[in-house]
Image (tube, coloured by chain):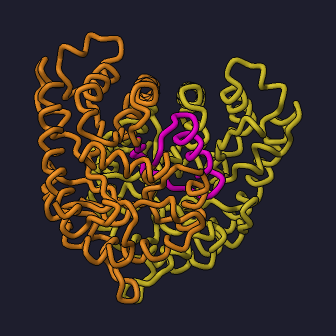
Chain colours: A orange, B yellow
């Protein structure tokens, strides 16, 4: 998907919400467990109920891999359903991969071609030749981990290299990678005040922001410091939407949650548009 | 697998060779392509031919994921075959995963339980709470990326934080993680001279060393600087063994290559034993 298409969807729907599909058999409504593929059945209901209010879906690959072959089937079905019924949706494989050239190309094929995702999350630790194989795919997007929302982010990401935090070094250095226009970045919402300095380094690149809601970040803070003239934000919510209810009315409750976030986003977009 | 079992296998076989199963349909002998599961057929032949000369197998997960559902089936079959026929083998999921707690636990279950691997490679960028969920599994091993063998390693890994390279910081900090005794580290052989300083930080932890052979590292250099009193090394070879021949005699040629490396390793182990 071209970035212009994503931006136009954001303005059309007045939303930059990404729904994270962290689908967990221990948490989905019990009545779905008797279905042939409960994970897909759950995802389908969630997608049908929330698609009006969001512009992106982000399956968390770990949740599918944990169920082995069956999980992989559910992921394939979910992606096929999204591609067929909601081709306007931006899809993110939250895979956090990263390996050397030869192997990165394999991962890129797995997610960009076999599963037809629009984007994938990637860890930066192995550097340029682990990232560029992903960037080489046209109209596909590589979302590099910069500053994550967990406590462990302070172990290395915020440590200073020649006076500059590692995560800023990741932003600076990756700007010089081939096809860097296909880069986006993960920046955790629990550190919204850091977004101001991040925007000095990458004024317009899209940021995928986890950690709003269950993980404690504020949408208003994220928008205040992180919104760019092209919006430049995808804010993710997973558990708050998926598990708003664990009863038969789960999809209706998911829709209500998604709509509530979309309305807050609409207000933020109006500020951007000077309304 | 307990670490003592791995060490006893190393001494029994006079080998610390790990065979990397980077199985690629474009490179395996053409006559296998007509089989129902060519990837598994190839892996089975390679394993049967090389098991005498090695102590570990390391499927590179990207190569399986690239083929979607079929690839995942081949991986499951390969692990089932290894666990049933060669339970003494140390198995490594070369997955380079890394995510926050909740999600890491999912990946750990996928590889340690569903697929029954003994170990998994993990990227350190997200810090403590992305690594400890893996370390919590008893007799399972977490192989943290420290210094990789690719050019991109110089982007971040060798950059200095308060006078200490990031990869050394990773070694230092991770020593303090809960269940750190379950840690091993990836250290590329192309930087063998770095092993001396690495051993000052982690004298006895096992190192998984890629990059001997095709990637240009020297076994003798690796052993000189990296061998510990408990050996503490697993040296990987993938392409040099797998694709020694692409004809019908591929398994025989793979065995010859593996045997040749094993003999070099035997000589190094004799030095350790003062023979």
Residue located 71% across and 69% down the image: B220
Q: Position of residue B236 (x, y in %)?
A: 64, 54
In the figure, is residue B143 to the left or right of B64?
Answer: left
In the figure, is residue A221 to the left or right of B215?
Answer: left
How many numbered discs sit on the rendered protein?
Answer: 0
Q: Position of residue B68 (x, y in %)?
A: 55, 31
Q: Is residue A98 magenta?
A: yes
Q: Is residue A234 magenta?
A: no
Picture quadrant of residue A178: bottom right
Q: Is residue A213 above or below residue A78?
A: below
Residue located 69% across and 17% down the image: B36
Q: Position of residue B246 (x, y in %)?
A: 85, 38
Q: Position of residue A23 (x, y in %)?
A: 28, 32
Residue B207 is at least partly visible in this image: yes
The one of B138 and B60 positioned closer to us in this rendering: B60
In the figure, is residue B243 to the left or right of A249?
Answer: right
Residue located 35% across and 17% down the image: A37
Which segment is the magenta one?
Answer: A91-119
Picture quadrant of residue B47: top right
The one of B30 and A138 positioned closer to us in this rendering: A138
The one of B244 and A254 positioned closer to us in this rendering: A254
């Amino acid at each position: 998907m071209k970035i212009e298409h994503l931006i136009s969807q954001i303005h059309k729907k007045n939303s930059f919400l990404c729904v994270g599909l962290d689908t967990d058999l221990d948490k989905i409504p019990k009545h779905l467990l008797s279905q042939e593929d409960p994970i897909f059945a759950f995802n389908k209901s969630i997608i049908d109920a929330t698609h009006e209010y969001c512009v992106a879906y982000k399956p968390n690959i770990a949740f599918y891999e944990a169920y082995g072959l069956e999980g992989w089937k559910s992921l394939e079905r979910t992606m096929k359903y999204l591609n067929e019924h909601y081709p306007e949706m931006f899809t993110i494989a939250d895979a956090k991969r990263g390996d050397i050239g030869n192997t990165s190309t394999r991962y890129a094929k797995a997610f960009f071609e076999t599963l037809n995702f629009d984007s994938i999350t990637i860890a930066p630790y192995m550097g340029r030749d682990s990232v560029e194989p992903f960037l080489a795919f046209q109209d596909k997007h590589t979302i590099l981990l910069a500053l994550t929302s967990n406590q462990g982010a302070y172990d290395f990401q915020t440590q200073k290299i020649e006076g500059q935090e590692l995560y800023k070094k990741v932003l600076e250095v990756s700007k010089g990678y081939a096809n860097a226009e296909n880069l986006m970045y993960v920046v955790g919402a629990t550190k919204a005040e850091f977004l101001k300095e991040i925007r000095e380094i990458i004024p317009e690149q899209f940021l995928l922001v986890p950690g709003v809601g269950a993980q404690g970040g504020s949408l208003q803070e994220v928008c205040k410091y992180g919104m760019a003239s092209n919006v430049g934000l995808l804010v993710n919510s997973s558990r708050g939407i998926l598990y708003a209810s664990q009863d038969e009315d789960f999809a209706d409750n998911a829709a209500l949650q998604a709509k509530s976030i979309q309305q807050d986003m609409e207000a933020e977009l109006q500020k951007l548009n000077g309304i």
